[in-house]
Image (cartoon, rainbow, N blue to C red):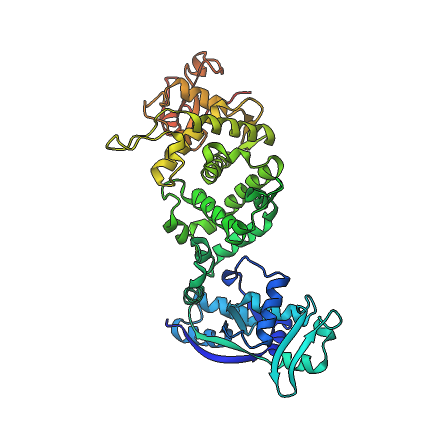
Amino acid sequence: MKTKHVSNKIRVSQLAYHMVENKIYLDEAFQSNTRWGNQANQEYMRSIIEGRAITPITVGSVDSILAQLEVRFGPTHVDYNFFKDLRDKGFKYITIDGNNRDNCVLKFINNEFPLALGRYESDEEDLAEFTITNDNKYYKNLDPSVKNYIDGIFLNLAVVTQSTRIGLAELFSNVNKGMVLNSQEKRNAIPCKFGQLVRDTARKHADGFGRIFSKISKNKKETIDDKKINRRFPDELIVKTAVIVSHGTVKGLFSPPLDAAYSDNTSEVITFNQTEKIISQLTKLTLKYGKTAFAASGAYDSNMIDLIMLLNHLNKNKVVIEDDEKFYDWFTESQLARTSNPEIIYEGKTKTNKRTYAGLLRSANPNFLKIREDILIDSISEVPDGILTFRDTNRNYNPKIRYTLWKRQDGKCSITGKQIQPRHILDGQVTHIDHNVPHRHGGETTLENARLVYKEANLEKSDALELVTEEITFD
C-alpha cells in the first residue's frame, strides 16, 4: 500500500489540547530513547516563538488510515486491528516523528519547564518583542498578550492518511535519515508485538542495563553510558537473546535473523518468557557483582553472549543456580582461562583461518557460536560442587554426574557408540543414565556401574530378564 499524506497546520494550543486529552498516541516504535532536557526544550520553544520551527511534526490520522486498511485488506487484517484498537481507545493521531516536540509543547503549557531568560522577537504588530525574566518565565506567569501569541502560533503538520504499519516504519526511517539510525533503532520502528516485548523488558530491567552499559567517568566513578542506552544497546542484546532462545546458534547473530524476529507471531514472541528469564538473570548478576566477567580479552559483548548461551542451556535443562556469586565467579575465572588459552581450536576448511577461543569471540557467525556453545556446555563439568543442581518433578541431583559419564565414555553413547552432542548431556528427552550391569543381574546403582546412553537406545534395549523403561537415579 502506498503511503499518502497531506500538509496541514496546528496551533500550539491545539497541539497541547490534543496531548492533554490523550488524542495523540506516542508510539514507542517511533520514539528515540533520547529524552529532551530543559535546555533542549527551551531551545525548541524559542524556535517556535521566533518562527524557526519549520520542520513538520509527522502524524498518522487513525480514522483515515483505518478506513483505507478496511477497504484494501478487510477488518481481519492485523494492521486494521492495530489501528482499530487505537481508535477504540480514543486516539485521533499516532505520532511518527516529533514525540519530543509534542512533549515539549505539553510540558511548557503544564509549567514543567520555564522559557530561557532573555529577549524574544515575535514581530507582531502589537507585540514586536518581549523579555523573559525570573518573574514571568513559566507559562502561567506570562503576560496575557504573550500567552495569546504563543497559543496562536501555527506549527507545520504532515498528516499520513494511508499506510500500513511497515509503511509508517519506513517513513520514520526516511524522515530520520540525517540521524543515521543504527540497525536496532530501525528495528524498533517496526510496530509489532515483539518490538513491544523488547521495549517492555528493557524498561523493566533498566537498572541492570544501566550497570551493564556503564562507563568510568573522569573522576573514576561508574556512570551510565547514556549514549549506549539511548541508541538502544539493551534492546539489541534482548533481541540477540531471543534469537538464541528460539533458534540456538544455527542462524548466527547478524542483522537478518534479528530483523526477522520483529513481527507479531514469530517464534521469538512464542518463547519470549524464556528470553525474559535470561535477561532477568543477566541483569541481576551484573547489578550484584559488576560487569568484570565480560572483560576477558576485551570482547565485552561476546562474553555477554557466552553467558547468555550458558544460561539458556542451564534453563532449558532445568539446572538451577544455587549460589549466584560462586557461579558468577566461576564463569569469570573460566572465561578468562578460555580466552587466554593459546590453543588453536578452529582452522577452517583450508586450514588457514586459525583461531583460538579469543579469536572465535570476534565473530557471531553460526559455526563460531556453535563451537563456543559446545565448549561452554562442556565446562559445566568443572563447576565446583554446590553451585548447580538439576531439578525435575521427582528428584534433584548434581548435573556433574552426567558430565562425568560423558567424559569417561569419550562423549559416546555406550549402547550405540554414536557421539552425544554436549547440548544433549543434560537433556532427559535425549539421553538417560543406565546401569552398565543390569540391576536384575546384581548391578549396583553406583557411579562405577552407570553409563550415559541415548534414551531411544535405552528404551529399546532389554536383557533376558528385564525390559528397561526408565533411567536410573542417584540419591
Disc count in the image?
A: 0
Q: In which quarter of the image is residue 282?
A: top right
Residue 262 in the image: above or below residue 460 = below
Query: Is 125 situated above or below 446?
Result: below
Please identify the quadrant where the N terminus is shown: bottom left
Nearest to the observer: residue 410 or residue 147: 147
Say which residue appears at 31% left-offset and 30% top-offset.
354
Which residue is depicted at the point 58% across and 52% down? 203
Of residues 319 and 300, the one nearer the viewer is: 300
Picture coordinates of residue 177, whole percent (x, y): 42, 63
Asked if residue 335 shows in the view, the reply is yes
Residue 231 picture location, percent across and down? 50, 53
The percent coordinates of residue 428 (x first, y second) are 45, 31
Outermost residue toward the bottom in this view:
125
Residue 41, quarter of the rendered image? bottom right
- Residue 239 is left or right of residue 391, and the answer is left
Up-down relation of residue 319 to residue 259 (above or below): above
Kindly tell me whether residue 90 is visible in this rendering.
no
User: Residue at coordinates 60% horizontally, 34% vertically from top-left?
Assistant: 289
Q: Residue at x 53, y 41 (%)?
A: 278
What x and y, as percent, mark residue 435?
43, 18
Assign the C terminus to one quadrant of the image. top right
Most distant residue in the right direction: 135
User: Residue placed farthest to the top in the image?
Assistant: 442
459 lies left or right of 279: left
